[in-house]
Amino acid sequence: MKVVSLASGSKGNSYLIITDKTKILIDEGLSEKELIAKLSLLQINIDDIDAIFITHEHDDHIKGLATLLKKYSPKVYIHNDSVEAANKKLKNNLRNEIVFYSNDIITFNDICVENFTQSHDSKHCCGFSISDKDAKVSISTDLGTVNRDILNHLYNSNIVYLEANHDEHLLLDNPNYPAFLKQRILSNNGHLSNKTSSEIIKNLSMNNVRQIILSHLSEENNSPSLAYNYIKDKLKENNILEGKDIFIDVARQDKIGTLFNITKK
């Protein structure tokens, strides 16, 4: 299995997963031009994408779908509670959809996809764990808090893409963000902070997770270096060493992330 972040952040999100028989996207929040350009860097054609799995209906996760579905025919897997809201956002251009329900296990070609419910200010939001014969990758962004069910899905993943959206101090001191927006982001239906993410990573490191990709970083209230260094230092306080006990990378808004090739669990 190979996995890479094509883009991660409030302007657009998409993750690519490749196996021997399958190519899927998790979310499609990029323009057609952006998506084609990023896929071409990986020597992949857009019509090679077999399916797109949608986490939720917010624009930065689906805004590229309408144009894409007019020209190409990937299957679109979407939670039952998200269909109506997503179709409205897409001006009734949602098509090829296959509806799933909470905790369904989807077998698609040579992969198995599990979904888990996340707390976010959308009609419904889910994370995904994707497995093949060799590997397991989990993606968990756009959530304000975690629970035991989410953690259980993340445990034993080769790679976890985990939200580290904001530094709490930067967010609270940001004069460009009104109070209601700050409260939304900080709420249990908002986004994970660097602090909360560090606590989750500590837990994951003790449950057979060795690679974390910090994801969905705010461009105004965070930075790759801030998130990385904060979390590295917090882990060190708990005798967990980045680069030895766990490895941390950062998914970016402006560029393709590291392409990981996982050969075995």
Image: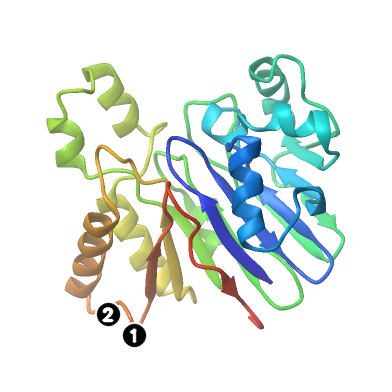
Q: Where is residue 228 in the image (x, y as percent from the top left)?
A: 28, 62
- Identified at 21% across, 74% down, the residue is 236
**Residue placed most toward the observer, 25 or 121:** 25
**Residue placed most toward the observer, 238 or 70:** 70
Is residue 153 in view?
no
- Alpha carbon of mark 2 to alpha carbon of mark 1: how far? 5 Å
- The image quarter in which residue 4 lies: bottom right
Q: Classify 101 as above or below 215.
A: above
Taking the image as shown, residue 190 lies to the left or right of residue 168, namely right
* Placement of the C terminus among the 4 image quadrants: bottom right
Q: Classify 198 as above or below 14.
A: below
Residue 244 is labelled as 1
Residue 220 is labelled as none
Taking the image as shown, residue 98 lies to the left or right of residue 65, namely right
Q: Position of residue 232 (x, y in %)?
A: 25, 68
Amino acid carrying mark 1 in the image = Lys
Residue 241 is labelled as 2
- Identified at 46% across, 49% down, the residue is 147
**Residue placed most toward the observer, 74 or 131:** 74
Badge 2 marks a residue whose secondary structure is loop
Q: Classify 10 Å Cα crowding around label 1: few (below 14), some (14-19), many (20 and above).
A: few
- Identified at 38% across, 34% down, the residue is 188
Q: Classify 96 as above or below 180.
A: below
Q: Position of residue 73 (x, y in %)?
A: 86, 39
Amino acid carrying mark 2 in the image = Leu
Q: Are marks 2 and 1 in contact (CB under 8 Å)?
A: yes
Q: Classify 94 as above or below 31.
A: above
Badge 1 marks a residue whose secondary structure is loop
Q: Classify 10 Å Cα crowding around label 2: few (below 14), some (14-19), many (20 and above).
A: some
* Placement of the N terminus among the 4 image quadrants: bottom right
**Residue placed most toward the observer, 148 or 201:** 201
